[in-house]
Image (tube, rainbow, N blue to C red):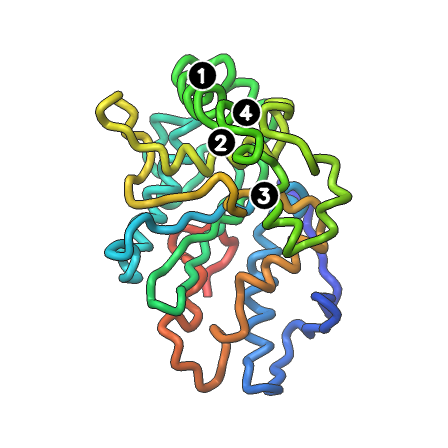
Amino acid sequence: MPEQKTYPQEIQIHSNVHALGKTNRTNKIRRGLKNQYMKMILDSMNQTKGLYLITWTYGKKCWGNYYDEVVQDIGQIRKRIIHLFYQNHRKWKDERPTPEFPKQWFFIEDHKDGQFHIHLLMEPVDPDLMCWGFHNRRFQKYWERIINQKITERTHNDQRVITEEMVSRFPEYKNHPHYGKTFSQLNRYDGWLVARFICEFITHNNPRNGEGWGLSKLSNMPTCIHSKVLETDEEVIQKIDYLNKDKNFSFKSDQPLSQDHLCVFYSDLKQKL
């Protein structure tokens, strides 16, 4: 049984304090509801360190413009991640294959032009499960194709773990142990490499070679921040705050998402709102 976690009555985020369980109408934002969402997600986590943050965009402007379409794609992402390790698990919509299998939380974000993109917050894959994968022929095939024949074959700039875009937005990454490294230099159990593997597995679709593994509509660029590891509790809380944007909790919000930014149906939550 997962350890029962308790959180302080106030969560410190960026220098602002969000009081849990209280409604604050400052700036016409329903802070109480936002904090309820944040607490619900945090309480669902078995751990709050080493989580993967993965982002997928749509490859063409004609895709990802309808909310229901995006939810269906999220279902396919969840299914493929589970079947990556447990091919015959049938109840992927509602249940994880084992209590230890990484939990997943999906968020839908809209661009100014109305197109959506997808964020996945995912618990790290246990080293024992990765070890099993490295001894499984089907998983070995995926890893060999995505990592050894694709990611690590790119030029140095296109396989940097910490990209210059990341450093320009978050200068503290210059002090990260992986700064200056490429994915080919990482241990195969490293969370940054595993997150990148999952990110590109979901977009890898080459039916001509019998590799229709991912979703053809989804895209990612090697030099963009499409996968990373959140290594501290503070970083996890900051990112959950970011994913639960204020605009989705506005009293007079005219945004199309409202609180539907969290894809509750395919997220591993202890409770549903």
Q: CA distance from mark 1 to mark 3?
A: 22 Å
Disc nearest the viewer among 1 and 3: 3
Place of residue 107 in the rendered image (x, y in percent of width and height, measured from the top left): 45, 57
On the image, numbered disc 4 is attached to which residue?
A: 129
Name the N-terminal-most of marks 1 and 4.
Answer: 4
Q: CA distance from mark 4 to mark 2?
A: 15 Å
- On screen, residue 203 versus residue 225, left or right, reads left
Marks 2 and 1 close (CB-CB < 8 Å): no
- Residue in the picture at 77% in, 43% down: 175
Marks 1 and 3 close (CB-CB < 8 Å): no
On the image, numbered disc 1 is attached to which residue?
A: 140
Residue farthest to the right? 175
Give whichever of 183, 87 is nearer the camera.
183
Disc nearest the viewer among 3 and 4: 3
- Residue in the picture at 59% in, 37% down: 124
Place of residue 96 in the rendered image (x, y in percent of width and height, measured from the top left): 45, 38
Task: Name the kind of residue labelled 3 in the image.
Answer: Lys
> Number of marks in the image?
4
Name the N-terminal-most of marks 1 and 3.
Answer: 1
Task: Name the kind of residue labelled 1 in the image.
Answer: Gln
On the image, numbered disc 2 is attached to which residue?
A: 197
Name the N-terminal-most of marks 4 and 2.
Answer: 4
Query: Which of the 4 image quadrants contains residue 64?
Result: bottom left
Q: CA distance from mark 2 to mark 1?
A: 12 Å
Task: Name the kind of residue labelled 2 in the image.
Answer: Phe
On the image, numbered disc 3 is attached to which residue?
A: 228
Query: Which of the 4 image quadrants contains residue 181?
Result: top right
Could you tell me which secondary element the residue under label 2 belongs to?
helix
Place of residue 79 in the rendered image (x, y in percent of width and height, measured from the top left): 36, 38
